[in-house]
Structure formats: structure tokens, C-alpha cells
Amino acid sequence: MTTTEVNRPVGASLRIAPSFRATVDVKESGIETTIEAHYKPDPGRYVITSVLNRATQESFDSHRLLHTPPQAILRAAVPYCITVRLDDSADSPWLSIADLTGTEGRIIPQWMADAVTKYGVKDERWDVIEILYGTSALSDSPPVKLIALELGIPERTATSWIAQARDAGRLGGLLSKLGRPADE
């Protein structure tokens, strides 16, 4: 995915790919799965529009061929399909969410999480909430849980921050029905 392909504005500062194709080849099972997903504004997330499974080895796991997890592939691919600018200058580069951190299993680096959970930080906090909420909502995952985990905060605080970010106009075009509602 190149930054020129990630050109649709979503939220206040995110850009996403309008559609993408992702392929995973699992050598152990001998199965390759390709999904195609398109951003749909009405649900405010990526929707999988096709799934193609094929055997890549003569001896393959026929059960896995019939039961591949396309949602897991979607969740792994979405961070590569979202870009953000960390600086307001016009010549600042767009970075994919996947480029933000090298820590396995995290979306934002720990230093960023530590910085935005300090008392009194607002705009930077909403930037991070937008990144995390967008990543979660676009991949149809529960954003409250992800935000609480990434920032090391209680779910109630994550819910409150989501509502405040939405009120600040940061989450336009991003919706999630999973987990606790953001305005609870």
C-alpha cells in the first residue's frame, strides 16, 4: 500500500485507502487466503467483499481451506491502510499506522501512550484516540477495549474519551457498534 493509494479523508486527520486487497499464505496449512475490502461510509468501516482461499501445496489442510478467518486478515491489514500526519506542516509526510511503532502487538508506541494519558493533554489525546478508534472501527473491532489496552486506562475512561473526541469533531465517518457505546 502506498501513501498515494491512501487518499480518502476520514475523521479529522486520517486518510484511508478506499479499498484494498490483502493476502496471507500460511505455509503450515498450505492455504493462501486473499480478501478484498471496501470502505463503506454508512457503517463507517471496511466491509469484506470477497474471500478467495486456495491450496498452495499438494498436501493441504482441507478443513482450514473451508474455515479461514477473513476477519483476522482484515484486522491485520487495516493499520497499513490508514495514514496520519504527526506534524501540522504542509511538507510533513503521511505515515501509515503500521509505521508508527515497531513493538509487536501495539498500534502506537509506548512513549505516545504515556504522553497522552497525562493530565491536561487534549489535542494530542484526541489525535491518538482518533488513530486507535479509527483502526478499531475500520476493522470492525471493539474500540473501547483497544483504547483501554493501548493507553493502559480503564474502559470507562476510554468510553469517556471517545465521546469527547467525537464531540470535538474528531471521529467523523468512523462508527462502531461493538463494545460499550461511546456516549454511555
Image (cartoon, grey):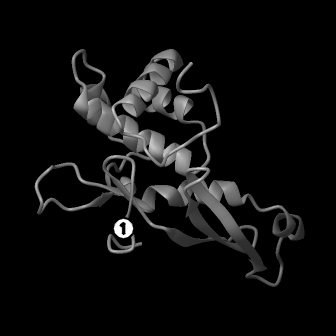
- The residue at the point 39 percent across, 47 percent down is 11
Q: How far from the left and from the top, in percent, is residue 117?
A: 31, 22
As helix, strand or loop, the secondary structure at mark 1 comes to: loop
Q: Residue furthest right?
A: 63
Of 167 and 86, nearer the camera is 167
Up/down of 129 relative to 85, above or below: above
Up/down of 111 relative to 31, above or below: above
Of 46 and 66, nearer the camera is 46
Q: Residues within 10 Å of mark 1 (few under 14, many from 20)?
A: some
Q: Is residue 134 left or right of residue 29?
A: left
Report the number of discs. Answer: 1
Q: Residue furthest bottom?
A: 58
- The residue at the point 45 percent across, 66 percent down is 17
Quarter containing the N terminus: bottom left
Mark 1 — residue? 7
Up/down of 160 relative to 49, above or below: above
Is residue 110 in view from this perspective? no
Q: How far from the left and from the top, in percent, is residue 68?
A: 77, 62
Q: How far from the left and from the top, in percent, is residue 14?
A: 35, 53
